[in-house]
Image: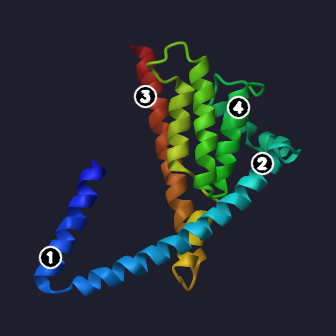
Amino acid sequence: MLDIIWPFFIIISIIFAFITGNIENINNSIFESTSSALELTLTLIGMMCLWSGIMEIAENTDIMNILSKVLSPIMKVLFKDIKKTDKEYKEILMNIIANLLGLGNAATPLGLKAMQTMQEKNPDKDVLTDSMAMFIVLNTASLQIIPTTVIAIRSSLGSQNPTKIIFPVWVSGVCAVICGTIAVKIFIKLEKKK
């Protein structure tokens, strides 16, 4: 759908610029936006490489064991049918940690890997398991302690105080996780009653 909407908007903008005599403004904005898009992309790539490397190191050190112990009580409540020794447990944990650090781009491949592992063990491939549903909601809610991607974007766009959004991100993240978790638990119970 977006492949239809965006070209439509671009064509309408160019036609409107011709009619109003502002074609020079369109040309200027194209060059300015490509320059700022490249700058933002380089900033995000550098940050993503740094944090992906840190996550790779954490995965192969005792840091994961420490974080696993800290998050273990929460994991038991949210993912009752996944054992600590299961492969997907570690993958889900890595994704949650990446999200907590605000690394949405680094968390995405970890989340896809975890979903693939859970799908391999899923007896009914056309229906999500309870753990898969919970994981999707948690991943989408994306509770972040340090919203590094948003801070990097705000910083690259010249924000005077790029970290000012931390408290609102915490509030909205906690609300999203609580509401999402409650909704999933309710739907799981309703589904089991059928």
Mark 3 or 2, which is nearer the eye?
A: 2
Q: In the rendered image of this protein, does residue 154 appear above or below residue 192?
A: below
Q: Are discs 1 and 4 less than 8 Å apart at CB?
A: no
Q: Which mark is first along the chain, 4 or 1?
A: 1
Q: Position of residue 162 (x, y in %)?
A: 57, 77
State yes or no: discs 3 and 2 in contact (Cβ < 8 Å).
Answer: no
Tell me the crowding category of disc 2: few under 14, some 14 to 19, or many 20 or more residues within 10 angstroms, Cα based: few
Mark 2 or mark 4, earlier in chain: 2
Neighbour class for label 4 at 10 Å: few (<14), some, many (≥20)? Answer: many
Residue 49 in picture, x, y percent from top left = 70, 59
Furthest residue in direction left, as rendered: 19
Say which label, 1 or 3, has the lower sequence index.
1
Q: What residue type is disc 4 on?
A: Tyr
- Mark 1 or 3: in front is 1
Residue drawn where x is 72% and y is 24% of the image: 83
Contact, mark 4 vs mark 3 (Cβ under 8 Å) = no
Residue placed at 48% from the left, 24% from the top?
A: 128
Residue 56 image label: 2
Compare marks 1 and 2 and give the one earlier in the sequence: 1
* Residue 118 point in image, percent of width and height: 60, 25
Q: Amino acid at mark 1?
A: Phe
Q: Secondary structure at mark 2?
A: helix
User: Mark 3 sits on what residue?
Assistant: 187
Residue type (three-letter) at the residue carrying disc 2: Glu
Label 2 to label 4, Cα distance in Å? 16 Å
Label 1 close to label 3 by CB (< 8 Å): no
Which of the numbered marks, if any, corresponds to residue 89? 4
**Furthest residue toward right:** 62
- What is the C-alpha distance between the residues marked 3 and 2? 35 Å
